[in-house]
Amino acid sequence: MTEAAIAIRDLCKTYAGGKRALDGVTFDVPRGQVFGLLGPNGAGKSTLINILAGLVNKTSGSASIWGFDIDEHPRNAKASIGIVNQEITFDPFFTPLETLENQAGFYGVPKAKRRSLDLLRAMGLEDKANAYSRTLSGGMKRRLMVAKAMVHSPPVIVLDEPTAGVDIELRRQLWDYVRGLNARGVTVVLTTHYLQEAEELCDRIAIINHGRVVANEPTRVLLGMAQEKQVVVTLDRDVTAPPQARCFEKVEAIDPRTLAITYRKDRTNAGEVLTAVSEGGFAIVDVTTREADLEDVFLNLTRAAANG
Ligand SMILES: Nc1ncnc2c1ncn2[C@@H]1O[C@H](COP(=O)(O)OP(=O)(O)OP(=O)(O)O)[C@@H](O)[C@H]1O
């Protein structure tokens, strides 16, 4: 069996004051994947990452990184992971090249083994190597943070909300860099509030809620768990009385001639829904369908956990 990049077993954390932030968390991050860690605010994601980073002490359970237990081999465990936090932290008066060299010094990487320029190239910052870091754009600063977390060549990198507050174009750029890192063999763990980001990038996703894992599946399996689908039909005339059928879960009027009809794919299919609309005496002029997305699954799972 190939060992996991990160193995977490029955991890618990109760903060002083009694808050139980992690309540028996168990999962593996397989090597070579982009792994998404999702959860609503306060679910325990930062606590988990901080335990891996050695910044927060766990209450019980175990965790290992690249086969190194964080208690038994803390130095090796730390050397195996690079963590990119949400905050941008580097001295604005150093250049990107100096920033990486300083960080490599901090990690004790010998000069001969440093590859600061390679990293800057990989992050698209080569031509900024000698600029003042404070003159970089927001997206460049984030990429510099990723490069900084990579100076000791860890096989695993954790990106905590890498695109929070970043506009869509920069977000796509950062996604490309994440894909590039992964293509070079780096295992990537990503926390994000943007479900579309997880859907696009992650091979596998774990969802945590109230300190527990409520799902841990390949992304496509998770997406398959969404049962609701929608067809949007444009009709030949204004609808005064919306059509009704047992296979409809919900009918909403988008405009007088356009209806969004929700159905459950485990109970019916788009063909039956469209037939029911025609049988209601309408001719269908246009049809589009909307696939359920991760957001539907996420809401269902976190809601189910809240109610259960
Ligand atoms: N130092 C601390 N002392 C006490 N409680 C804490 C501490 N840090 C976090 N918590 C609590 O533990 C729970 C989990 O917090 P955590 O920051 O791990 O969640 P999160 O999933 O990272 O949330 P977010 O997405 O908002 O960062 C929350 O209820 C939080 O208030």
Image (cartoon, rainbow, N blue to C red):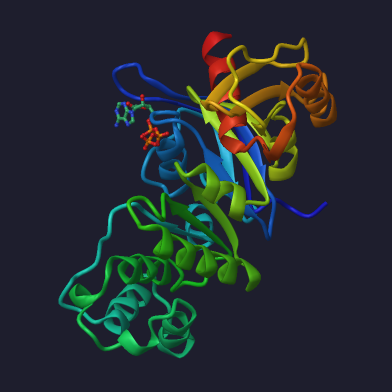
Q: Nearer the viewer, residue 83 or 246?
A: 246
Q: Nearer the viewer, residue 78 or 190?
A: 190
Residue 45 to residue 15: above or below: below
Q: Nearer the viewer, residue 261 or 35?
A: 261
Query: What x and y, as percent, mark residue 225?
Result: 72, 30
Residue 68 seen anywhere in this rendered image of the structure = no
Query: What x and y, as percent, mark residue 200?
Result: 60, 53
Residue 93 to residue 72: above or below: below
Q: Quadrant of ligand 1?
A: top left
Residue located 75% across and 35% down the image: 224
* Residue 121 appears left or right of 89: right
Residue located 34% across and 67% down the image: 139
Residue 108 to residue 242: above or below: below
Residue 178 to residue 201: above or below: below
Quarter where residue 40 is shown: top left
* Residue 73 appears left or right of 4: left
Q: Nearer the viewer, residue 140 or 68?
A: 140
Report the quarter where the C terminus lies: top right
Total marks placed:
0
Query: What x and y, as percent, mark residue 118?
Result: 47, 85
* Residue 73 appears left or right of 203: left
Residue located 28% across and 76% down the image: 99
Residue located 68% across and 44% down the image: 219
